[in-house]
Structure formats: structure tokens, C-alpha cells
Amino acid sequence: MFFLFGLGTKQKHLGPGETRTCPRCHNTTQWARMREFRQFSVFFVPLARWGRRQFEACGICGAAVAV
């Protein structure tokens, strides 16, 4: 079966974030600043993006905190 459209969540790495202690794994590391959005595409060309949010994620366990 061949699909011509796609719907998914994309994440983009924006650089290093703050050094924090993670509430989930209790490790102190530098977190990564990320941007996430939902996207609709046709023939691999993005047509619409919505639900944008920025957050910082723990590099060890992936826990996220809104910025």
C-alpha cells in the first residue's frame, strides 16, 4: 500500500540548556533545549505545522520540562 501523505511529530534540537537535577532519574546533567511540533505533509513536503512548544529534556532519561 502506498501513502501520499503523512502526519507526525517532529523534534528539533536547539542547543544546550541549563544544568539541572532531573526529578525522574535524580542525575545532575546539562539538559538539551528542544522544539516540538505536529506536521502534515504530502509527498514529503510539509504543508501545515501546529502545536509548537519548547522544552528542555534530560539527556539521560528523556524527562521534559517546559521552558
Image (spheres, helix red, strand yellow):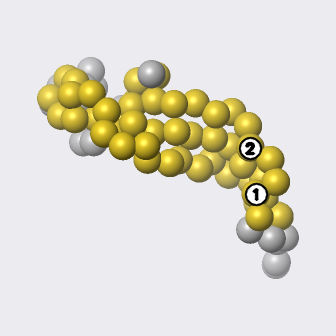
> Does 8 appear above or below 31?
below
Image coordinates of residue 21 in percent, x first then y, are: 20, 23
Task: Check disc 1 and give the amino acid type.
Answer: Pro
Quadrant showing the N terminus: bottom right
Q: Which residue is mark 2?
A: 49
Q: Is residue 10 left or right of residue 17?
A: right
Outermost residue toward the bottom? Answer: 1
In percent of the image, x 43 and y 43: which residue is there? 14
* Element on which disc 2 rests: strand
Residue 4 is tagged as none
Closer to the camera in the image, 27 or 15: 15
Q: Residues within 10 Å of mark 2 (few under 14, many from 20)?
A: some
Q: Residue at x 80, y 47 (%)?
A: 48
Does residue 62 appear in this view? Answer: no
**Dot 1, how many residues are within 10 Å of its Cα: few (below 14), some (14-19), or many (20+)?**
few
Q: Nearer the viewer, residue 65 or 19?
A: 19
According to the image, label 1 marks what residue? 46
Measured from the top left, where is residue 12 in percent x and y?
50, 48
Element assignment for label 1: strand
- Percent across and percent down for residue 24 are 27, 26
Task: Please say if the residues under marks 2 and 1 sit with CB atoms less than 8 Å apart.
Answer: yes
User: Amino acid under label 2?
Assistant: Arg
